[in-house]
Image: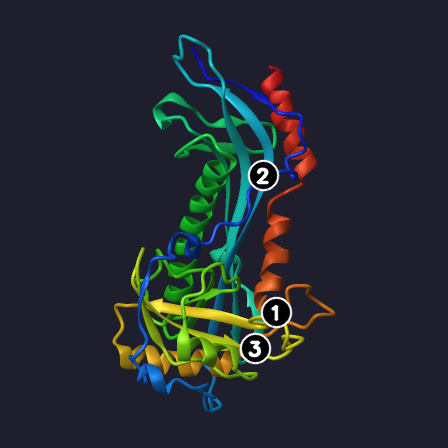
Amino acid sequence: MAMRFAVDQWDPSYGVANESDTEAAESGATLDTALEVPTDSWCPIHPAPVATAPVVGFVDGVRRVDARVWIVPDGDPDGVAVPGVCASWASGAAVCGPGGAVIDPESVVVGRTLAAPVEPARSEPLVTRHATYLPVEAHGPTPQDLWWAVQQEMLDGEARVTAAVRARWPQSLLVVDGPVRGRDQLRDTVGLVKTHQVTYLSGRPLETLRSLGDGDRTPVFAIHGGFDRFSWYVRLPGGGSPLVPLAGVVRCETSIRATAAQAIELADLVSALLPRFASVPHKDRRAPQNLTPIAGLERQLRRRLGDPALLFRGLRMTASR
């Protein structure tokens, strides 16, 4: 018996799980805060200006739930439906060099995903008039489980984009939006975490973090937990009121496969470059952390997702048949 499915009439833009950040599961991480300076000697570091800026590639992805569905897996004798989502996602890169910023069309990856707690062998692609959604297995039936399965597909797409950009620009510096997990095998690759769900630092390091001025960074420290990496914080200009905790602050991280000296050198380079890409409030409500190249990339990628009303109608038509 072939897989059956139905489309939930509930607007898919409501009730979507919050964006996942791997920080949320790492409150028990251990730190080494004495890599660059002794812990009790922490103070803000202002990196020297960069004389010759490298080519910088900013990698990001977007995703959207097109419809919530209910699926009866192939061969289910009881005909019990399980929840799922049909989602569209896209990953790409904005490359900034001496000639300006460009969206690299050859590195853009677009995907359609059917996420449900169903083994791949018991599901099949959902083929509609306008798109085909490929099945992936979610770990559970909750909205968070389904959204995380889509998130993982998008992150896999970002990993392919990262490799493609590095192949075309071998000497480039890559900044990926979000944690560096899954891309930590690539050199000169930095993850940019814009939200702070976990406070890693305490004591003198935390005081240093709160006292950062525009363009300052903290010393580099190591995080050992879900995955090991080097990390540091940077305050971007235009963060607003000093009364707002961590206003304008982003956390950067890079692979633990580098040496501490290499991580410190990379921290100086990245911290000197990021302020020139900071967004401004009258153009972006997520300023300054949502960097201008990333904001432009997101706009271009959302266009690649297609018309949500058209995709929703296509899914309903396929379900009715």
Q: Is residue 314 above or below residue 226?
A: above
Residue 211 percent across, percent down from the top left: 52, 82
Residue 227 percent across, percent down from the top left: 30, 58
- Amino acid type at circle 1 is Thr
Q: Residues within 10 Å of mark 3 (few under 14, many from 20)?
A: many
Q: Which numbered disc covers residue 65?
A: 2
Residue at which label 1 appears:
292
Q: Is residue 318 above or below residue 59?
A: above
Q: Residue at image x 53%, y 81%?
A: 98
Q: In which quadrant is the C terminus drawn?
A: top right
Q: Residue at image x 34%, y 57%?
A: 28
Front tag of 3 and 1: 3
Q: Residue at image x 60%, y 80%?
A: 237
Q: CA distance from mark 1 to mark 2?
A: 25 Å
Is residue 35 shown left or right of residue 273? left
Residue at which label 3 appears:
236
Q: CA distance from mark 2 to mark 3?
A: 32 Å
Residue 194 percent across, percent down from the top left: 52, 64
Q: Nearer the viewer, residue 127 or 278?
A: 278
Q: CA distance from mark 3 to mark 1?
A: 12 Å
Callout 1 secondary element: helix
Q: How is the image coloured?
A: rainbow
User: Which residue of the protein is positioned furthest toward the top in this rendering?
Assistant: 77
- Amino acid type at circle 2 is Val
Q: In which quadrant is the N terminus drawn?
A: top left
Q: How many marks?
A: 3
